[in-house]
Amino acid sequence: MIVAALPGDGIGPEITRAGIAVLREVRPDVECVEAPVGGDALARGLPALPDETRALCDRAAAILFGSVGLPAYDGKPLQERPEYALFLLRRDYELFANVRPVRVFPGLEDASTLKPELVRGLDLVVVRELTGGIYFGKPKEQRVVDGIEEAVDTMIYRAPEIERIARVAFEIARGRRRRVTSVDKQNILETSRLWRRVVTRVAAEYPDVELDHLLVDNAAMQLVRRPRDFCVIVTENMFGDILSDEAAILTGSIGTLPSASLGTRRDGKFGLFEPIGGSAPDIAGRGVANPTASILSAALLLRHALDDEENAARVERAVERVYAGGTRTAELVARGEKAVTTAAFTDAVLSQLE
């Protein structure tokens, strides 16, 4: 069984090595095959998503992704930027559901910018629609009209797109605390009025799951006011992009948060699994990056793509024990405490696997 490992840019190669090491430890039958993507590919004179990399993904059971993006490509057209690879992967493999678990591990409460009592026990999931909305709608262009520069982005949703992401959220909620919060802007946007109607209609199929609705501005406020009240949040592409990053930082470090992007291929099992923290080129190569998100992305890969709940839980318990034992990378240590390297943290997780 093959997993396509696409390390990418910045700290991507360092943290992806951690995810690969954990996968190899718990599933020796899985072969992780690496390939270039993003700025790494562009630097070799290749497209951001080379044909060889796409061919590898075609035959793989899943994709373990690192990160893409480098300052040298800022301002270039999308097709010439590292991020275009991620755009193509999401679009071409119909990865419509981005699932982001947000959890505060015991012992990390003080790392949050919120009071520890607000985030202690925080455990929620953001489900973001990933292939529709304003990021993909057309027309999308800059133009000159009557001598005046203007730009247009089109937000569009169709009912089936909303139905399928809503079902993902309700199914996840059934395995948790059975509550879904749908976020929209129905007081202003026609797309949000459709969104709310369709989500409400889908909710009737899940009478065992409670549904409530929040406007996006209120949701942003409540996430920092009462974050533990949330179980599963479902929302459209742009709102999800913003809210999932807000939710992630509640944990004290975006370096601890994994994600899964799931689609329709292979009965929904195929997906792209990646940290959400970005390429962080300012710390690349220094061995100080937190590999937790990549390790936990590997756990999500085990759970969703390989149907291996046992080993996914093993990995998650190992990470929890490492943090409970006081091991921290640089961004999480308190003043006067000693930080461990990326490699040392990975070794600590490997040593804690049951």
Image (tube, rainbow, N blue to C red):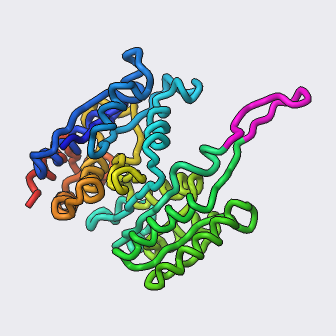
Residue shown at 57% from the left, 24% from the top: 76
- Tell me where the magenta segment starts and ends, as one range: 138-152
Find the residue positioned furthest to the bottom.
208
Label the magenta part by its dominant secondary structure: strand
Find the residue positioned furthest to the top.
45
Residue shown at 23% from the left, 54% from the top: 306
Quarter in which the N terminus is drawn: top left
Find the residue positioned furthest to the right.
146
Q: Locate residue 168 relative to residue 242 in the image: left or right.
A: left
In this view of the protein, which residue sits in the foreground, 222 or 305? 305
* Quadrant of residue 31 within the rendered picture: top left
In this view of the protein, which residue sits in the foreground, 325 or 135? 135
Q: Residue 216 in the image: x percent, y percent?
A: 62, 64
Magenta-drawn stretch contains 141? yes
* Quadrant of residue 147 within the rendered picture: top right
Residue shown at 33% from the left, 39% from the top: 66
Q: Is residue 186 among what the camera can see?
A: yes
Q: Residue 344 in the image: x percent, y percent?
A: 15, 43
Residue shown at 34% from the left, 74% from the top: 175
Magenta-drawn stretch contains 307? no
Q: Is residue 259 depicted above or below 183 in this figure?
A: above
In this view of the protein, which residue sits in the foreground, 209 or 57? 57
Q: Locate residue 224 relative to residue 24 in the image: left or right.
A: right
Q: Is residue 324 among what the camera can see?
A: no
* Quadrant of residue 161 within the rendered picture: bottom right
Q: Locate residue 141 relative to residue 95 in the image: left or right.
A: right
Q: Residue 351 in the image: x percent, y percent?
A: 8, 53
Q: Residue 243 in the image: x percent, y percent?
A: 53, 58
Q: Is residue 36 depicted above or below 93 in this figure?
A: above
